[in-house]
Image: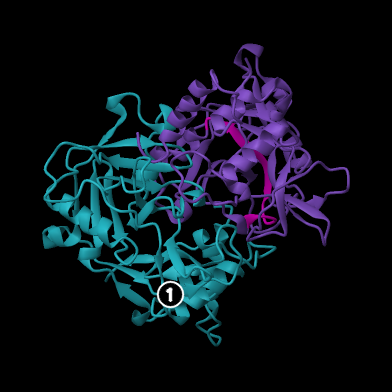
Chain colours: A purple, B cyan
Amino acid sequence: MRLASLTLAACLALAAVATADPAPPPNSLDAILAAAPASAWRDIPQDRLVYLTLPQGRVIFETAPRFAPNHVANLRKLAAAHFFDGLFVVRVQDDYVTQWGDAAADRPRGGAAARLAAEFDHPYGSDEPFTPLPDPDTYAPETGFTDGFPVARDPLSGRAWLTHCYGMVGAGRDLAADSGNAGELYAVIGQAPRQLDRNVTLLGRVVQGMEYLSSLPRGHGDLGFYEKPEMRTKIIGLAFGDQLPAAEQVHLQALRTDTPAFAALLHNRRYRQDAFYKTPAGRIDVCNLPLPVREAK
Amino acid sequence: MRLASLTLAACLALAAVATADPAPPPNSLDAILAAAPASAWRDIPQDRLVYLTLPQGRVIFETAPRFAPNHVANLRKLAAAHFFDGLFVVRVQDDYVTQWGDAAADRPRGGAAARLAAEFDHPYGSDEPFTPLPDPDTYAPETGFTDGFPVARDPLSGRAWLTHCYGMVGAGRDLAADSGNAGELYAVIGQAPRQLDRNVTLLGRVVQGMEYLSSLPRGHGDLGFYEKPEMRTKIIGLAFGDQLPAAEQVHLQALRTDTPAFAALLHNRRYRQDAFYKTPAGRIDVCNLPLPVREAK
């Protein structure tokens, strides 16, 4: 148990002390989450969740209709038509993306469009929620969170966009900006490829089962496509939560970013206070702060 | 073939045109590397390379003796004593690290130290090579490359340190800064955990076979440690290149960063010029520029 493993030990030691002394402020991720009231969490509705079932396990991602309303709506139609069932994970490029589906597949689409206008960014307006982060970002003037998603903003243009952090899900496309339709999706499995921001439509974030996308064998063809068909992973199904029987639904909650618990978490992640860290960074990148998600009790 | 897959097509199209017209400047990664002269590459000496052999395949990392001389020297002694042979990959935490070895193992060490002073950073001096990057970094005043490794610098303190980018290799330690010895190592397999910079001794970078560390099944114990021993991956061996028979050595070359080829690559990665990108970022993070490595012809 090395390399940061003592974080938990320090937390437990602190909890033991707290029975006798006035409780100190929680100083670890686990302690902050344990101390967060129920109101610090939001339920993720089933109609926002997409369940991608693979032989290895189930991946669940939350969709972002504020940022990609047409892609999310199109994905709903494709899912209802069982468009993905029996298609494959076709590409796993190390330190980049895992990609599945086939936008051009010749199968029932349930009225879904074959091409969609890009949803790369949008004007954010004064009423759009936004929890800003305090540190400078290499790629954008501002970063933070909206609806629980990592976001960048440009106050000069008044536009906001989702950022390509680990676990973000996007719609593959061809050369034309309007050539995607959410029939082919990818998830980021390495260092955030922020150069893709505002170049591809992001539509969600994996909230459970990420390992079933990130630990797949890498492809050895160009761009990580599998050269041998037998290396592909067959998709058992892809459906929104409200398209599934209740018994198959998972009830998830995500930490709200407009709460004291999030503020405490942000501070803790910028200034690690446990005994392992000798020089706290005092900074954080928007992609180094994956928002906590838990199963509802 | 979607999502940036047309980069290659655009490059090939360009190459076809170039037979008739004056050659345009290379505008893709592949074209830039193909045009780079032999002098743009440096041979990586065998005594700098470490070969970690797993049942799945061979991982090779280049060591950074300028930054971690004592850890690299200690690792050499451990390798010579076959310290790692038969130990295991014990931890795979998604979006964080893969970790192997056992610093406390009771086995021959060949005179290697059991504890080493931290090598978190060092005074860089005016003669230390450094290729700076032009864009702001969230975590450090300056970033760039030294000896082919991603580096951060603070001109105020005059200190430099390796950064925790994808594929970087470090020495696990316990709570005390001097509790590591390179008998337990980790590699970054997700978003760069830059909060670890200057908190753990980094000593190298994977230059071949990264997928054999990044695609392993994730552990489900605390911090991604495997709970079931049978999930661990057994280490067949770990040796420096010059400790291996010539027939087992791989001759690798890395792109030098003090060359026009690197400058062209940097420009290309900041301003993607192929038809896929609609809004080039114009920026790059030090962890988004993994240096090209090739097998020598």
The kind of residue on which mark 1 rests is: Thr
Task: From the top left corner, tell me how far across and down residue B88 is, in percent.
Answer: 25, 37
Which quadrant of the view contains residue B172? top left
Which quadrant of the view contains residue A109? top right
Q: Is residue A17 above or below residue B296?
A: above
Of the 4 image quadrants, the one containing the N terminus of chain A is top left
Q: Which residues are magenta?
A: A196-209
In the rendered image, residue B205 lying in the magenta stretch gets the answer: no
In this rendering, would B141 be left or right of B49? right
Helix, strand, or loop for circle 1?
Answer: loop
Q: Chain of mark 1?
A: B
Nearer-the-camera pick, B12 or B279:
B279
Query: What residue do we see at 14% from left, 46% from top?
Result: B109
In this rendering, would A166 be left or right of B121? right
Which quadrant of the view contains residue A108? top right
In this rendering, would A98 be left or right of A262? left
Q: Is residue A178 above or below residue A44?
A: below
Of the 4 image quadrants, the one containing the C terminus of chain A is top right
Nearer-the-camera pick, A265 or A207:
A265
As drawn, the residue found furthest toward the top would be: A247
Mark 1, Cα crowd under 10 Å, few <14 / some 14-19 / many 20+, is: many
Query: What residue do we see at 62% from left, 69% from top?
Result: B271
In the rendered image, residue A198 lying in the magenta stretch gets the answer: yes
Q: Is residue B279 above or below residue A214?
A: below
Q: Is residue B1 above or below residue A250?
A: below
Residue on which the image places disc 1: B257
Task: From the top left corner, tell me how far across and down residue A90 is, in percent.
Answer: 49, 43
